[in-house]
Image: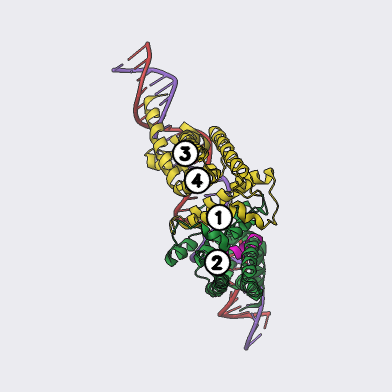
Chain colours: A green, B yellow, C red, D purple
Amino acid sequence: MRADAQRNAEKLRAAAAELFQERGLQVPLKEIARRAGVSHGTLYNLFGTREALIDEVVTDRAAHLLDQVGQQALSLEDAWEGFTYYVEKLCELQATDPAVADVVSGRYPNAKRLMTACARSMGAARQIVERAHEAGALRPDFTNADLVFAFAANALLARATGEAAPSGWRRQAAFLLDGLRTESSRHPLSASQPTPQQVHDAMASLGDKA
Amino acid sequence: MRADAQRNAEKLRAAAAELFQERGLQVPLKEIARRAGVSHGTLYNLFGTREALIDEVVTDRAAHLLDQVGQQALSLEDAWEGFTYYVEKLCELQATDPAVADVVSGRYPNAKRLMTACARSMGAARQIVERAHEAGALRPDFTNADLVFAFAANALLARATGEAAPSGWRRQAAFLLDGLRTESSRHPLSASQPTPQQVHDAMASLGDKA
DNA sequence: AGTCATCTTGACCCGCTGGTCAACTTACGG
DNA sequence: CCGTAAGTTGACCAGCGGGTCAAGATGACT
């Protein structure tokens, strides 16, 4: 690789990192090129696809953040505290950082490294939910899939209302958490669980409409 | 107005009603014209703006549905039952009918009749929340603004995951409701209320991104 | 310095949206 | 039945996004 190409790749990575973080993973590639000060042709040249760029620029940071939150949650003595910490922190991360929100919502199936990081994070979530169940703190009918939907809802709400009402999502998250304690499960759910396939499809299509 | 124009207007209204209901209020106007079997020029001719078309085609049905849910909720003896009925039904309406979801989310400020219907519905919501508060069933720190955000979250989630997991939103709504009972308010909220201005801005910008 | 592979550029393609308007067609009253 | 006002049409404008590629520029090696 020639030195100028190297430099341009670096400029593009920097611009992409900024824009992804500011506006999410769907920012126009041409805009990234513009901010980097190179032609968009060069971007296509050096990275080929959006996914490749994401994988180089977002994956490590996102994986690090997600791992950190998961581990911190598991390191807390109390299982319920760990669970609330996890939910709150992750919601905050989503609200703060659109790139992470998009990662959590799990589209971009072609970004391989990203997907593995995402899977690892899901594992942590499963552990955290399980531990809370075992401690008898989390209502038993709350599943991992429900958590995924909750994060999806939070991501969408935070993105849609984030600028106008920066902590709108926060109260919703708090209300939800209060509804997830064991004591609340007196009132049985009427809606049945979605299948794993449904969860997967739902997440994959998160960004398609609206 | 000439008879053929009348007929075309009718065809356009019918097509618009269908498409709005199927896909929400942002469907391309050209697509409405296509389904109606007329040129898009004619649509602009007869209605001028999207808002005008919405006002003619959506307002009455949406207003009727919203009023009905509100009145039904208030007619229930038990204040808490009324509240849950209202939340559940309205969430269901949003999930079932993208047009109504868009109405509830309150964009399209130029559709005058729609906005007044929307305001009336907000009034009913306020009553329902108040009554639940007075009955001591609803946690005291839950406000009207929170309800608006909850509906926004539900609309976004239902639209994003509706096809893949048609009742994903339902469980979220159920968990939320369980968190809204008075007993749950032991755990005080840390996030402060959004200002009315924030709520307004947040709703106005709901459809802009993502 | 000269040469050639590598790299960059920006014009160009596609499809999608909203929106306008001159030229054509048609309904309807006299 | 015919003239004219009313209505319709589709080509056209502009803007957005993704994506390609021939032509030109430039880094690097001899």
CB-based contact (under 8 Å), mark 1 and mark 2: no
Q: Name the residue under label 3.
A: B65
Output the chain of dot 2: A
Q: In this view, does B60 lie above or below A164?
A: above
Q: Is mark 1 on a helix, strand or loop?
A: helix
Indicate which disc, 1 or 3, sits on the residue closer to the N terminus: 3
Mark 4–mark 1 CB contact (< 8 Å): no
Q: Say the numbered circle drawn on residue A50.
A: 2
Residue at the (55%, 43%) spot, across then down: B79
Pinpoint the chain carrying mark 1: B
Q: How far apart are marks 4 and 1 (CA)?
A: 13 Å
Between disc 3 and disc 4, the foreground one is: 4
Image coords of residue A66 (percent x, y):
62, 71
Q: Give the answer, above or below, for where B120 lies relative to B160.
A: above
Q: Is residue A180 visible?
A: no
Quadrant location of the N terminus of chain A in the rendered image: bottom right
Task: Categorize mark 1 by other alpha carbons within 10 Å: few (<14), some (14-19), many (20+).
Answer: many
The reply to whether callout 3 and callout 4 are in contact (CB within 8 Å) is no
Q: What residue type is labelled 3?
A: Leu
| Three-letter residue code for mark 2 | Arg
Which label lies toward us, 2 or 3? 3
Question: Percent position (x, y) of residue B74?
Answer: 52, 38
Q: Which amino acid does label 1 sit on?
A: Asp
> The residue under label 4 is which amino acid type?
Tyr
Provide the residue designation for mark 4: B85
Q: Which of marks 4 and 1 is nearer the N terminus?
A: 4
**Could you tell me how far apart the alpha carbons at marks 1 and 2 are, in whole angstroms?**
41 Å
Residue visible at 48% across and 55% down in the picture: B170
Which residue, given by chain and number where applicable, does mark 1 sit on?
Answer: B178
Q: What element carries label 4?
A: helix
